[in-house]
Amino acid sequence: MRLNSPVNLLTVILFLAAGSARAQFPASSNDPRHSLKDPHVGGSSNLKVLRHIPLGGWSKVLGLELEQELSRPYVYVARADWGGDMSMTSKGVDIISIKDPAKAEVIYSWRISNPLLHQGIGGRDNAYFKLKGRYYLVNNLQFSSGGPDADVGAVVLDVTGLPDTSKIKEVGFIRTPDTKGGFHNGFMYKHSDGRAILFATGGDPGGRIYDMEKFLAGDPNYGMIRKLPHPEGGAAGGRAAGYHDYYVAYDVATKRDLLWGAGSGGYYVYDVSKPEEPVLVTSLTGVSGVRNGHTFTPTPDGRYAVTETEYQYTPLRIFETKPGLDGTAKNISRPVGAWLGSWDGNPHNHEVRWPYVFVTAYMDGLQVMNMMDPTNPYTVAYHFTCQCILPAGAEGAGQAGGMEGASDLDIRNADGLIVSTDRRSGFWVFKMEGFDGWNGRQWGMPNTSSVQDWDNGPDGAPKPARVS
């Protein structure tokens, strides 16, 4: 479909998504138009469930990270107390072994000390990195000022010794003495200059950039390089003025390290080839229906990007970003395509493995779309992980509703294994038929995704003088 105007875009989205809902989902006796009032179970035959591990009640699991080396079959699942009883003790991270995906199991749990005193969410997100032959986990944490450690952004664990859990060591905490609230998200990046760099959001408008080698060496400033500039149009102060998510990748065509930040007002691309001096390249603002960006993920070649803004009934929007990277467009405001799992859905986090986009779509579970033609993306696989009925009130239908269900995911490029968390039902392992691994070069693309090559650096980048 060609989307030539905002009106046509909305019309096509509602028409196609509603038709899809009628075809796939059972109708409710109370309201046949509302596909989410009946519990969804099962999914498409080409997406196989290998393992499901329940991990507590609502929002006790959030973000996760999957190690990429087949010899290190470990998944890191953030454990939280978001919603319901905030005095629970699941604030930290679980380590799950997927050595045999069909028998995946929790092998280790790290929890903040005195968890009942710590107010707030707890474990929010995870990232890992490799440096000088050792492996480290960054478990992003969020605690409020009502208890201790409100200035903690993350805990760093040395997980080199796995599967021997007795060798896991707590390296230390990354703290933000000048602000509270912790890190909402973090992206670990192998920079083209050889450094292992953490880009963290939350706790400070604009977010922060850290050199993890300096952190490990005991730098008194926790290895912080600098704060990232506020998004254009974002007033200083308050979470809304900063960023929600980052994605960082080396752009082969322009030979730049680019940060793709979603935040106040929309989406922003920075040149962070010198992290000490970020330079704004282009922005996606003034987009109809977008007040704040949530997630911003480019295709491997940077020509297109998939964007999320989190509220019910809104699709993932696809933009052509090449004009911005080429310098011919300072700002881009109109998408070229859009996708929505069901007409009343709420797509959330996503991973791009061209031409596929893997989406944790809350009540619509894990969804996989094909964006080979970015103007006409379509669903190719799905599985409903929540197994629940859309609740009433703030957690249910509404402008910010539909937030039950699948929350985060990751993909192992070596063999195509998919792992996901669900805010209601826990941890899942999947395999999609015909998807046995991913390498961008097989598609005529740079071999670029959220996965980092910690030994060699970004695909297409010059070999750095220093190698971790």
Image (tube, grey):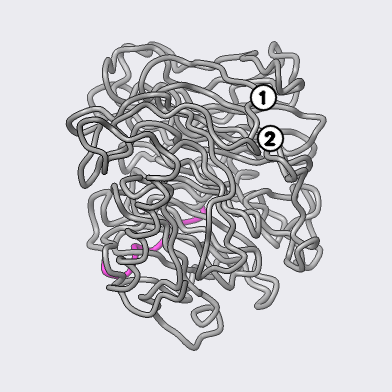
Q: Identify the residue at the far bottom of this view.
A: 328
Q: Nearer the viewer, residue 262 or 228?
A: 262
Whether tag 1 and tag 2 are in contact, CB under 8 A, the answer is yes
The amino acid pointed to by label 2 is: Lys
Q: Quick check: is 227 in the magenta stretch?
A: yes
Q: CA distance from mark 1 to mark 2?
A: 7 Å
User: Badge 2: few (under 14), some or many (20 or more) residues near its Cα, within 10 Å?
Assistant: some
Residue where numbered disc 2 is placed = 431
Q: Measured from the top left, where is residue 268 in percent x and y?
A: 42, 67
Vertical position of residue 372 compared to residue 205: above or below:
below
Q: Residue at x 23, y 50 (%)?
A: 238
Q: Nearer the viewer, residue 122 or 293?
A: 293
Vertical position of residue 74 compared to residue 297: above or below:
above
Main SS of the magenta segment?
A: loop
The amino acid pointed to by label 1 is: Leu
Q: Measured from the top left, where is residue 226 in percent x and y?
A: 46, 56
Q: Measured from the top left, where is residue 176 in percent x and y?
A: 39, 40
Vertical position of residue 125 compared to residue 4: above or below:
above
Q: Identify the residue at the far left of this view.
A: 393
Q: Nearer the viewer, residue 381 or 115?
A: 381
* Res 174 visible: no
Q: Secondary structure at mark 1?
A: strand
Q: Quadrant of residue 251?
A: bottom right
Residue where numbered disc 1 is placed = 50
Q: Is residue 83 left or right of residue 109?
A: left
* Res 104 visible: yes
Q: Nearer the viewer, residue 202 or 395?
A: 395
Q: Which residues are magenta?
A: 225-233
Q: Residue at x 71, y 19 (%)?
A: 102
